[in-house]
Each structure stands twice: as structure tokens, then as C-alpha cells.
Image (spheres, rainbow, N blue to C red):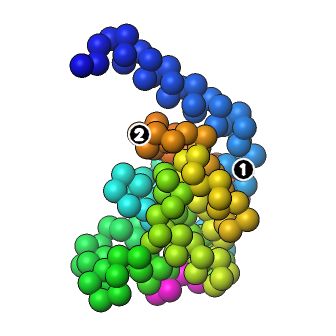
Amino acid sequence: MIDEAGIARLVAHSVALKQRFFAEQASSVIAAGQAMTAALRAGGRVLAFGNGGSAADAQHLAAELVGRFLAERPGLAAIALGSDPSTVTSIANDYGYEQVFRRQVEAHGRAGDVAIGFTTSGRSKNVLAALTLARARGLRTIALTGAGGSALAGQVDHLLAVPETDTARTQEVHGMIVHVLCQIVDESLAGA
């Protein structure tokens, strides 16, 4: 059973991991945020997707963009591809679960849009299939992963790989990345 000292260790590890990630990859996060801003400014959209907790991160990102993050502004075009159970289950039933995001990128993605795939392992076949198609169709691609995602280098435009194998700690950093990306977009569009 976890005690107060155990909680303190978990929090300290999470904080240190966030500090390390942003110290090492701040420029990559900024570049990803600028890609999102450019797409949205040009009338494009953000397509976000992942499985399980990563699906929740994708929904969180889309909600912050469509709703608001820091300040009042018009809603921005963003879709979380895991949010529609009828679409997800029909594609999974008819084509297989590995196609649930790829098929939606095929339907909704246009050159100049941004596809953001969340996979803590870096190996989720359905996320990788969607990112591959997105890049081939001229979308800018961003992958948020854990340590196992380093194999995606060169396969996506922006790789944000948290140097961690623990899913929970990786997702804690992903949550902060989502907020930082949204802040970059909001501040950039406010200055437009």
C-alpha cells in the first residue's frame, strides 16, 4: 500500500520527468505548436487520436482547441478521432481495429492539416497506420510517445518522445505537452 513517502516519490519523479523532457525538447514542442498554428491559421484542422488514456489526451487537445484554452477566441477546427463510437466500432467491425484512425484520416484529412497521434508505447498499429497515411497525404504529423517511440524518428514531422517507459508517468507529461501546445496556438493566433 502506498504511503505518504511513496506519494512524494511519485510526484518528485513526475516533476523531474517533466523538467527533463521540456529541457531537452522545448524546441521540438515549439515547432509542433507552430505547425498546428500554421494549419489552423490557413483554415486547416487538427486530427488527434490514440487508444485508452491516449484517446482521452486526444479528446482533451481537441476540446481545448474547439472550446477555449487561455482566452476567448473563435473555435478552432479540431477532431478527436476516437470520440465517435459509431464510427470507431463500424470501422473496427468492417475493416479491423488497426484501421479505425487511418480510415478517418482518409475521410477527414487534407493536405496542410495536422495529424497528432498519441501512443505511449510508440507501437500502436492503428496510430502508426494513421500517421503513415497522413504524412503520405500531405498532413503535418506529430507523434506523442514514450521512450519506445524513438523508432518513429524520421517517420513523422515532429516526434515528442518522453524518455520514460511507465505509461502513467508518460501520460502525465503528455497532459502538460497538450497544454503547452494549446498555449502556443492561443498566443500565436492572438498575435496574428
The local secondary structure at tag 2 comes to: helix
**Residue 21 in view here:** yes
* Between 179 and 189, the one nearer to me in the picture: 179
Task: Indicate the amino acid at tag 1.
Answer: Ser
Query: Residue 181: image x %, image y %?
Result: 59, 50
The local secondary structure at tag 1 comes to: helix
The image quadrant that residue 168 belongs to is: top left
Q: Which residues are magenta?
A: 106-110
From the viewer's perspective, is the residue at label 1 or at label 2 nearer? 2
Label 1 to label 2: alpha-carbon separation: 22 Å
Q: Residue under circle 1?
A: 28
Name the residue at the top extreme: 5
Mark 1 near mark 2, Cβ–Cβ under 8 Å? no
Q: Which mark is residue 168?
A: 2
Query: Residue 184: image x %, image y %?
Result: 64, 49
* Between 71 and 171, the one nearer to me in the picture: 171
Q: Is residue 44 magenta?
A: no
Q: Is residue 5 above or below residue 157?
A: above
Query: Residue 150: image x %, image y %?
Result: 65, 53
Kindly report the secondary structure that dominates the magenta region of the rendered protein.
Answer: helix
Q: Residue at x 55, y 47 (%)?
A: 146
**Residue 79 in view here:** no
Q: Residue at x 50, y 20 (%)?
A: 12
Q: Is residue 106 above or below residue 29?
A: below
Q: Is residue 154 left or right of residue 16?
A: right
Q: Is residue 84 above or below residue 175?
A: below
Query: Residue 124: image x %, image y %?
Result: 46, 64
Q: Residue at x 65, y 77 (%)?
A: 135
Q: Is residue 146 left or right of residue 56?
A: right
Q: Is residue 85 left or right of residue 176?
A: left
- The number of callouts visible is 2
